[in-house]
Amino acid sequence: MFFICGMSQGKKILDYTKTVICGLCGGYGRYQVFMTYSYFSIFFIPIIKWDRRYYVQMSCCNTLYELNSEKGKSLNHKESVDISEQDLTLVQSGRRSSDWNRKQCSHCGYETTEDFEYCPKCGQRF
């Protein structure tokens, strides 16, 4: 007789819909709530789960927050929960994809996404 067993990590998307104005980027987005966990499996069937953590990711700028574990457990049990900013702890700051290459001239305030070395409006170095 042989056994196939192993340990791995998983991710589960939780059903939660709330649109908000992001406190970090000011964009209009929604909370995407998910749970990460470690598990032990036998014959590819998860038997034991541990180290559950709950996260919220903003759809507008991909900022990642850790969610209060009590609220996360309630969401996992499909209870009605309202997530507020007090329930979130910043894990990783995100940015809009359009802001990654944005440059702003410190002299005149001109903004561009082009790879200029000098400002095309006033001629000062970026």
Image: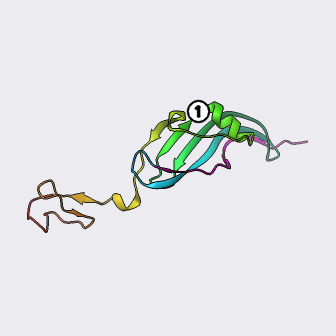
| Location of residue 109 in the rendering, given as x and y in whole percent from the top left corner | 17, 58
| Location of residue 1 in the rendering, given as x and y in whole percent from the top left corner | 91, 42
Q: Is residue 126 above or below residue 51?
A: below
At 58% from the left and 40% from the top, the residue drawn is 83
Question: To which quarter of the image does residue 125 belong?
Answer: bottom left
Q: Which residue is mark 1?
A: 68
The residue closer to the viewer here, 17 or 64, is 17
Q: Is residue 118 magenta?
A: no
| Location of residue 84 in the rendering, given as x and y in whole percent from the top left corner | 54, 38
| Location of residue 51 in the rendering, given as x and y in whole percent from the top left corner | 65, 32
* Magenta-tinted stretch: 1-21
Q: Is residue 17 magenta?
A: yes
Q: Is residue 84 above or below residue 102?
A: above
Q: Amino acid at mark 1?
A: Asn
Question: To which quarter of the image does residue 98 belong?
Answer: bottom left
At 51% from the left and 33% from the top, the residue drawn is 86
At 65% from the left and 31% from the top, the residue drawn is 70
Q: Is residue 53 above or below residue 22?
A: above
